[in-house]
Image: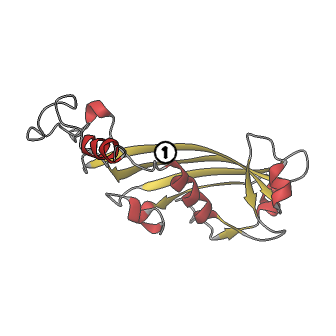
């Protein structure tokens, strides 16, 4: 039987113990992710390993995996979005320290001995993985790929009169007075 996800943990202590947290959380229990889902079923799996880096900072190295059922913004049908995110976070206490991190590490800003909310961390990783405008691949979507040409508009752009031509005529005619 899986252990429940702890609400808050001490990342400094877990890094000292080189602990591993793994578990599953129902997507419907994540208040910022659930409203974005077309279908709220499913769960997110996480595996987080706590260690210390060469400067003694706690590092969280792991993964977050889920299948999110989102709404395609092209056809408005349900679509699957697979999340398999690698997490590499360095716990820092200030912005200056965050700026000095190696490029492969993302900062996690926590004050000394401030607890880490595991669910919020997992939820953040899911939010970061959701596209701004989720869409099926073009060949898999029945929605409109482009706006069809209006047959009543009067043909192609070359055939239609330019509505600004009248203004150009007024401008040139007004200068000859």
Q: Position of residue 53 (x, y in %)?
A: 85, 46
Q: Residue at x 85, y 48 (%)?
A: 100
CA neighbours of label 1 inside 10 A, class few (<14), some (14 to 19), many (20+): some
Q: Secondary structure at mark 1?
A: strand
Q: Is residue 79 above or below residue 32?
A: above
In the rendered structure, the answer to whether residue 78 lies left or right of residue 5 reads left
Residue 127, percent from left and from top: 52, 56
Q: Residue reaching furthest right?
A: 55
14 or 39: nearer the eye? 39
Side of 146 where 131 appears, left or right = right
In depth, the one of 53 and 73 nearer the eye is 73
Residue 142's place in the image compared with 126, above or below, is above
What's the residue at 73%, 40% (across, down)? 104
Residue 33 in percent (x, y) is at 46, 62
Q: Position of residue 23 (x, y in %)?
A: 56, 56
How many numbered callouts? 1
Q: Residue furthest front?
A: 177
Q: Mark 1 — residue?
A: 83
Identify the image quadrant of residue 168: top left
Q: Nearer the viewer, residue 176 or 42?
A: 176
Image-based side of 86 in relation to 18, left or right: left
Q: Is residue 42 left or right of residue 157?
A: right
Q: Is residue 41 visible?
A: yes
């Amino acid at each position: 039987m899986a252990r429940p996800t702890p609400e808050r943990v001490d990342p400094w202590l877990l890094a000292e113990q080189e602990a591993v947290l793994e578990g599953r959380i129902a997507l419907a229990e994540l208040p910022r992710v659930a409203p974005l889902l077309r279908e709220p079923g499913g769960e997110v799996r996480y595996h987080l390993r706590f260690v210390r880096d060469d400067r003694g900072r706690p590092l969280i190295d792991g993964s977050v995996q889920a299948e999110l059922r989102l709404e395609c913004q092209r056809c408005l049908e349900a679509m699957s979005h697979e999340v398999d995110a690698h997490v590499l976070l360095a716990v820092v206490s200030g912005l200056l320290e965050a700026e000095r991190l190696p490029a492969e590490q993302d900062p996690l800003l926590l004050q000394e001995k401030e607890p880490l909310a595991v669910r919020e961390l997992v939820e953040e990783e899911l939010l970061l993985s959701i596209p701004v405008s989720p869409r099926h691949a073009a060949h898999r979507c029945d929605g409109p790929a482009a706006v069809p040409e209006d047959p009543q508009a009067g043909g192609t752009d070359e055939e239609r009169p330019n509505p600004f031509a009248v203004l150009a005529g007024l401008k040139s005619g007004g200068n000859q007075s």
